[in-house]
Each structure stands twice: as C-alpha cells, then as structure tokens.
C-alpha cells in the first residue's frame, strides 16, 4: 500500500534550512511514501470564536491531514520553543472540541538550527503538544541537526556523508513507525 505524509515545516522563510531538510528526507524515503507540504503561512490567527465557521484555509488543512497516513514536523527552534506559526496550525487542527484531526496519526519530529543544540528544546515542546493530541510520535532515534557549511541544498541533497547516513537511519525508522501505526 502507499502512504501519504502531511509535512509541516515550522519556518515560512524562503530559504529555510528546515524546508531543505524536508526535501532531503523525502529523497531518502521508500518509494511508497509521498510527501505533501501543508501550507500554514496563510492560516488566520486561531480565534475560538471562529470554531463554528472555520476559514477555508483551516478546512483545507484539516482535510489534508485527515487524508494522510502520517505526519512529519520539521521545525526550527524559536526562542527555545516552536515557532508561533506552527503552534497556530496545530491549534486550528485540534478544534472545534471533539473534532481534532490529529489523534492517532503517527508522527516524526525533526529539525535543524544554526545553534549547537539543533532544535532539541523546540522538539521537546512539540512532543508535549503532540502527546496531548494523542499523536503517537517516534521516540528514537532523536535527530538534532546543526546547520553548517551548506549542509542542505534546495534540491534535497545532503552535503555531508555522515549526516546523510544518519538521516537515512532516521527515515527508515520513521517509515517503519508510520507503517506499524497504519496497519
Ligand atoms: C532563532 N534561532 C534560534 N536557534 C536556536 O537554535 N535556538 C533558538 O532558540 C533560536 N531562536 C530564534 C528565534 C527567532 C525569532 C529566530 C528568527 C531565529 C535561529 C534559527 O535556528 C535560524 O534562524 C534558523 O535558520 C531557522 O530555521 P529556518 O528558517 O532556516 O528553517
């Protein structure tokens, strides 16, 4: 069978390292996996008053997530947490109460930063949110990537062999995780 993955990149920046990492991961995945980038930059700011009439962009996000067999979060760390745009998207998908799209969708969490701890604290915050939303999230291997020396290009190539090998290990574990939870 085939697996459609809803990809969330936590940066809106045009030359985002995390967007490039997302491309690299897609290249390393088995052929039965397809990766669909979910737009989060055009979502309104979440407002509970709108729960009864969610914006078209929110309904689009929710239907894309519902149609996916897995989730992949690739996020920078902003001030030791996840970027607000990503939290906004997650909050939208969790509402109205009782109509969350997240529950049960297997997920991976990964990220790249310029700092030495490579998004570790952002990922930990994200794991907390996903746990509450009943999203089974791959625990190991963890992946904290520090961007150095043009590690990723915009075609999804990885400029360092040991990083490439490590990311292959990570993608293999992620693919197995998605399969196990979709069975
Ligand atoms: C950062 N950056 C950053 N890096 C980090 O390792 N820990 C942090 O807490 C922060 N905080 C932070 C806050 C804000 C508002 C910005 C704009 C940046 C630096 C960050 O790692 C760097 O900008 C990355 O390039 C962001 O990822 P993208 O946009 O390249 O995907």
Image: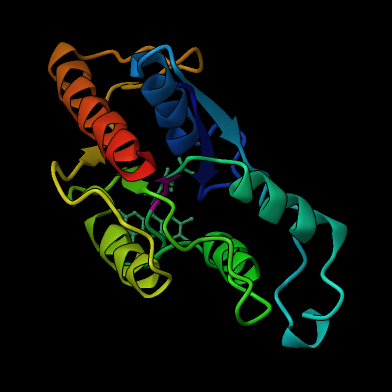
Camera-side residue: 123 or 29? 29
Residue 122 picture quarter: bottom left
Instruction: Determine the residue positioned at 80% across, 88% down.
Output: 49
Q: Is residue 106 left or right of residue 60?
A: left
Q: Residue furthest bottom?
A: 49
Q: Measured from the top left, where is residue 28 in percent x and y? A: 33, 16
**Residue at coordinates 28% horizontally, 22% vertically from top-left?**
149
Residue at 53 percent of width and 67 percent of height: 87
Q: Main secondary structure of the magenta part?
A: strand
24 above or below 115? above
158 or 105: nearer the viewer: 105
Residue, x 12% and y 17% (percent of image)?
162
Query: Residue 49 versus residue 148: which sits nearer the camera?
Result: 49
Q: Residue furthest front?
A: 183
For the record, the magenta segment spans 72-76
Residue 117 vs 34, above or below: the answer is below
Location of residue 53 in the rendering, given as x and y in whole percent from the top left corner: 87, 75
Q: Nearer the viewer, residue 59 or 47?
A: 59
Vertically, is 151 above or below 57? above
Q: Is residue 69 left or right of residue 64?
A: left
Report x, y in % for residue 151: 31, 22
Side (left or right) of 168 relative to 29:
left
* Magenta-colored stretch includes residue 161: no
Which image quadrant: the C terminus? top left
């Amino acid at each position: 069978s085939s697996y459609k993955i809803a990809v969330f990149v936590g940066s809106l920046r045009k030359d985002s390292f995390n967007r490039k990492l997302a491309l690299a991961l897609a290249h390393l995945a088995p052929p039965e996996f397809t990766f669909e980038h979910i737009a989060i930059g055009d979502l309104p700011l979440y407002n509970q008053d709108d729960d009864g009439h969610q914006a078209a962009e929110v309904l689009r996000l929710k239907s894309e997530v519902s149609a996916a067999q897995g989730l992949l979060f690739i996020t920078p760390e902003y001030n030791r947490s996840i970027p607000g745009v990503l939290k906004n998207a997650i909050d939208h998908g969790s509402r109205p109460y009782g109509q969350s799209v997240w529950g049960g969708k297997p997920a991976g969490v990964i990220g790249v930063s310029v700092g030495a701890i490579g998004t570790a604290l952002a990922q930990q915050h994200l794991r907390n949110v996903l746990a509450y939303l009943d999203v089974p999230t791959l625990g190991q291997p963890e992946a904290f990537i520090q961007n150095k020396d043009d590690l990723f290009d915009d075609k999804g190539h990885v400029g360092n062999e040991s990083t490439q090998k490590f990311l292959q290990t990570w993608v293999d574990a992620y693919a197995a995780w998605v399969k196990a939870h979709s069975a």
